[in-house]
Amino acid sequence: MTQAPTFAVVGHPNKGKSSVVATLSQNDAIAIALEPGTTRKRQAYPLKVDGQTLYTLVDTPGFQRPRRVLEWLEAHSVSASDHADTVRAFVTQHQGDGRFTDECELLMPLIEGAGIIYVVDGSVPYSAEHEAEMTILRWIGRPSLALINSIGADDYSDTWQAALGQFFQVVRRFDAVRAPFEQHLGLLRAFGQLEPDWETPLEQATHYLSAQRQQRRQQAAALIARALEGMMSFQEKRTLTADQAAGISDGPLADQLRQRWYRHQRKREQTLRVEIEHLYQHQRIRRQEAELEWHSEHDLFSEDSRKAWAVSKRYLATAGFGAGAVSGAGIDALTFGSSLGTGALVGGLIGAAGSYFYGDRLALPALNIGVLRDGLKTATFGPVQDSQFGYVVLGRAVDHWWHISHRNHAGRELLDLEPADHHWLENLGKTSRQDIQRAFDKCRKQRPLDERQREKFTSAIEQAMAVYDDWRLNRT
């Protein structure tokens, strides 16, 4: 890959520059505050994929005295041919001058060859102060792009569009907090058209970022599959001596193991969420449900979660039939086909019926105390016997993934995971439904998935993620 380009993000204080840098560099560690002057030193943020720097964003302080700077430039320039050199002379002369500290920090990456991304707030009126800033940037003569990033409720975008078009080669509206991924790629393509040396590296950058997005979905599906496999098969155990077993009643023991089982499952779900967030380079997400402080109706084991994420009895019947039919095929093999397919039919009916009758409630494990062996007994709670538990975990995981995968790194609002109002999984293909149900059935029987089964399970979850993505985007 050729030399990666550098872009300096410049503009008036507190107009969204740091938000643009955070989103385009996929870095949520960048400080974003409401008060002006949060950024006082220029700071470079490279965007890397697989160790390869695709481009670098430079966050800069805002202009403080643009009209004073422009006056100096005009007083020291002879003709338009020396504009860039005059700006360089200004920075050289005023380094260390407290009056123009921010301007020197802002202009330094530009005179060193960075492209210009000028950010304005489209919710405030255009003014002469902004015109001075834009004139200074035009003097530098670097490839330039302007972004209208509206922060407030008012809209002066049309006025800004007309004014910016006189100073910058490309003008775009860009909401740093909510802009979809395709707009990020669009900005890169636009810059590639402004500078011949950047066309190839930025074309490669869009390719890498698109491939990374697909790879992240696949990796997220694998993380969800692994978590589901562990949660569906998990069993809480306690070893008891004969005297302990005789001296403890089933009720308290069941309560102890149940609470430990619940805590494990909640913790595993939280671990999955952090894994998904870090996969998408979100290191500082604040969730509405963080540390289980969400209202109780949103807990993993709540009735509301079951209603929101559990599938219908009809869905369970069709998925259960396909999964059960495969198991029943083993009967036919053992009888060398003399059952004429009866095994597959019976297996399918049993699977469908079992899934169907579990559909109305979330059936949790029961306490089981084993027989005395070598003076010891083992009390167990789990694994879960109800496939609906898996669908609740799956639904919540896919919903969380969707919010994270569509969240820009400039976002600082609380992540609110509201339940779905329609069961999107009904749109999943028949084969994927059956692969998910088959995996759930094996896990709750504590029979590990082999490599091929795990691949099919992960692929089915990825298909479910695509279905949910389409449903959410069509809903909005």
Image (cartoon, grey):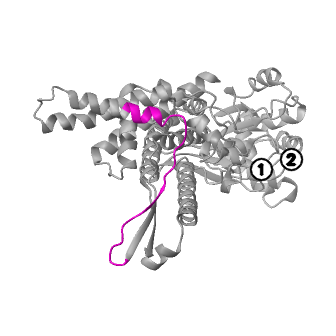
Decide which of 150, 361 is in the foreground and name it. 361
**What percent of the width, then of the height, locates residue 87?**
75, 45
Question: For this view, does 102 lie left or right of residue 457?
Answer: right
Looking at the picture, which amino acid does disc 2 mark? Answer: Gln
Question: For this view, does 335 lie left or right of residue 61?
Answer: left
**What percent of the width, then of the height, locates residue 321?**
35, 29
Decide which of 417, 261 is in the foreground and name it. 261
Residue 283: numbered disc: none
Question: For this view, does 304 lie left or right of residue 77?
Answer: left
Decide which of 292, 91 is in the foreground and name it. 292
Task: Calculate the distance from the C-alpha at mark 2 to the C-alpha at mark 1.
Answer: 9 Å
Looking at the picture, which amino acid does disc 1 mark? Answer: Pro
Residue 64: numbered disc: 2
Q: Is residue 43 magenta?
A: no
Quarter of image, res 454: top left
Above or below residue 272? Residue 416 is above
Packing grade of label 1 (10 A; few <14, some 14-19, many >=20) is many
Quarter of image, res 371: bottom left
Callout 1: SS: loop
Residue 61: numbered disc: 1
Placement of the C terminus among the 4 image quadrants: top right
**What percent of the width, then of the height, locates residue 236?**
47, 62
Above or below residue 182? Residue 39 is below
Is the C-beta separation of discs 2 and 1 under 8 Å? yes
Q: In the rendered structure, which segment of residues is drawn in magenta?
A: 352-375
**What percent of the width, then of the height, locates residue 73?**
82, 42
Callout 2: SS: loop
Residue 269 in view of the camera: yes
Question: For this view, does 68 lie left or right of residue 199?
Answer: right
